Image: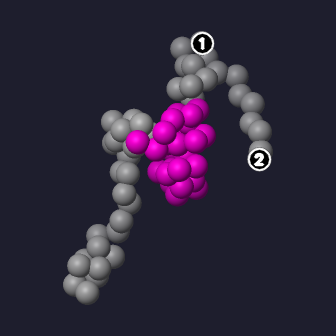
Amino acid sequence: MNQFTIELPPTISNDEARLLLAAKLYEVGKLSLGKAAKLAGYSKETFIELISKMNIAVINYPAAELDREISL
């Protein structure tokens, strides 16, 4: 596993930075939900609740693919 060190402003805690990083990596498809939750230090259920409050879609399913699945 890679390690990354960054100096944060005093207004941002390590936990908040870890959550924001995990949320963004999940949002752009770089991490699965489970791996992002683990990185953030939360259960999947809690992580889902937190990213939902950030307006990050928990299920990212393209509309065209959803239409195709429904018509089968």
Residue 51, visible in the rendered structure: no
Judging from the image, what secondary structure is the residue with disc 2 in?
loop
Residue under the point 36% across and 65% down: 61
Q: Which residue is mark 1?
A: 10
Q: Which residues, given as a range, are shown in magenta?
A: 18-45
Residue 15, visible in the rendered structure: yes
Q: Residue furthest right?
A: 2
Residue 69 lies in quadrant? bottom left
56 in relation to 62, above or below? above
Q: Residue furthest left?
A: 71
Three-letter amino acid code at disc 2? Met
Tell me the tag on residue 1.
2
Q: x and y percent of residue 47 in the render?
A: 44, 39
Q: Can residue 39 be found in the magenta stretch?
A: yes
Three-letter amino acid code at disc 1? Pro
Judging from the image, what secondary structure is the residue with disc 1 in?
loop
Image quarter where the C terminus lies is: bottom left
Residue under the point 60% across and 12% down: 10
Q: x and y percent of residue 46 in the render?
A: 42, 37
Q: x and y percent of residue 18 in the render?
A: 58, 32
- Nearer the observer, 72 or 13: 72
58 in relation to 41, above or below? below
Q: Residue furthest top?
A: 10
